[in-house]
Amino acid sequence: ENTPNNHFIRQIVSDDVAAGKHGGRVATRFPPEPNGYLHIGHAKSICLNFGIAREFGGRCNLRFDDTNPSKEDIEFVEAIKENVRWLGFEWNELRHASDYFELFYRCAERLIETGKAFVCDLSADDVRAYRGTLTEPGRNSPFRDRSVEENLDLFRRMRAGEFPDGARTLRVKIDMTSGNINLRDPTIYRIRHVSHQNTGDAWCIYPMYDYAHCLSDAVEGISHSLCTLEFEDHRPLYEWFLREIDLPHHPQLAEPVAQAGMTVTIGDPQQIEFSRLNLDYTVMSKRKLLALIAENLVDGWDDPRMPTLVGARRRGFTPAALRALIERVGVTKQNSIIEFSVLEGCVRDDLDANAARRLAVIDPLKLVIDNLPEGHVEELSFPNHPKNEAFGTRAVPFSRELWIEREDFMEVPPKGFHRLVPGGEVRLRGVGIVRCTELEKDADGNVTVVHATLDADTRPGLAGADRKVKGTIHWVSAAHATAAEIRLYDRLFVVPNPDDESEGKTYRDYLNPAAKRVVQGWLEPSAAQAAAETSFQFERLGYFVADRVDHAPGKPVFNRTVTLRDSWAK
Ligand code: ATP
Ligand code: MG
Ligand code: MG
């Protein structure tokens, strides 16, 4: 049943629509906390939430889960919006959990009035001590039996700023003996005298995630609240809040939201959990990504080696490839680790179909065709895509002096080497067959120039054009090529599980020293003139993208997105 095309969440939503549950409406949300950059794991949640809404003609909100003011930043908010759009999605409404602070407050007063919430004066340490453990039940707080009047008075004074941070909390009364620790009278408000990126200094009490999340879902009319598996144990709490507050029967609690100009669609959301996307050969924990940056092990959040969406974009991974990855991985409740090569395969598939071909040489060796006249220049017409004529053709300058790839020539070749060797022949892509006649060397004996003659009868369209030789190599015209900075990226770590800390190692010990190499290469003119963020296949070398930050037409900087074939295969 869990084939990518029919995963269990699609099935639930489809059944619910058929049964008219939630009034037949489908509404989802993507709820990031704006405390960091999104990574490829988040793409799963984005594709799932926005994808389900799109498939079922529903809506999907982008909601910033901004209940924890001290860690949040507007820089992250902007980056997240850009990431969602880059992946190909658009939200129906942009909301913030903080848009609902007044609603949350009123609901909390309602919980106090119905005897379900109390102000607790225990310190954080005591709350923890009273909570018990997995094997030991917790104990009731000595403040649990305060009167409704006292609780209301204290809670209002908490809001008014009369108490310092940590002096009091608001907790709900559920069951201190519950086997589910989340239900042991969880805290729903704490005092924090800090300003908030959205609400400024309006509040000094802030709601907890579990409390805020279900109410945000309810007031946005979310039908299916899709979240990752670690929230499975929180679902009873999610349902408890919704049941006790009962927003559908107390719509007046949502008045502040409508008064602030937002549409209110009160619903009865259901939480459904799915497994996280994990990738091998990388780390996705925010703490570790931050440490990589802080320790200068990478060049920032958008370093092409990073698994962040800004990094993936700069690397040249395409939105279509990431969407294909998510679809291929499917949605289940089993945690698993996806091989990085699956991601790379999705990128290759997309770029193979959609990236134009260009010629580039990244480790140049001079090739001189002695039987062409000095100053000889031709414009050759090359197809931009071998399998798709719609890509058209381009002019490629060809002349007497070329750059070829150093590794395409060997003076003393091993057996089975099918490229250029002294006295041997090779086909120059789109030109014809050349024979190596002579070498020039420097004082150390390194080959500096290869001389060759072109068999004029093997030019395209002529009688000898089909003559067989074993190898075909690429080239660029030395006089016409543009020097380019080429950044050769590879996997950030050399082991599949850099999170493995056994043997006293940390992920730092597994960094791939060859994950970034910068070389100077030579590009044919039409590659050098490309707009930033254009992807190409540089023939025989791999897929490359014009760096979105540093590239300028005529002053090219290209990042290797992925090699043509998987060189990591086991
Ligand atoms: P934290 O800030 O504690 O690291 P987080 O990584 O879950 O939390 P959020 O900003 O809360 O980050 O994530 C937004 C949404 O993306 C959540 O619904 C979360 O469950 C989901 N999400 C996060 N990481 C993954 C992942 N690896 N795979 C799938 N979904 C994910
Ligand atoms: Mg987060
Ligand atoms: Mg989170």
Image (cartoon, helix red, strand yellow):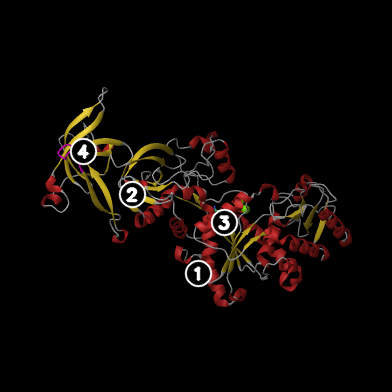
What amino acid is found at the position of numbered circle 1 in the picture? Answer: Glu
Percent position (x, y) of residue 274? 55, 59
* Tags 1 and 4 touching, CB below 8 Å: no
The mark lying in front, picked from 3 and 4, is: 3
Name the residue tied to disc 1: 55
* Image disc number at residue 420: 4
Regarding mark 1 in the picture, which secondary structure is present there? helix
Ranked by sequence position, the earlier of labels 3 and 4 is: 3
Q: Is residue 69 magenta?
A: no
Q: Residue at x 83, y 65 (%)?
A: 113
Is residue 452 or residue 479 the one in the foreground?
479
Q: Is residue 235 above or below residue 565?
A: below
User: What number is the disc on residue 526?
Assistant: 2
Mark 3: which amino acid?
A: Lys
Mark 1 Cα within 10 Å, few/some/many (few <14, many 20+)? few
Q: Does the magenta portion include 371?
A: yes
In magenta, the rendered stretch is: 369-376
Specify few, some or many for label 4: CA neighbours under 10 Å numbering under 14, 14-19, or 20 or more.
many
Residue 287 visible in this rendered orientation of the protein: yes
Against 254, residue 546 (above or below) is: above
Whole-number angstrom distance, CA of label 4 to CA of label 2: 26 Å
**SS at badge 4:** loop
Number of the front mark, 2 or 3: 2
- The secondary structure type at the circle numbered 3 is helix
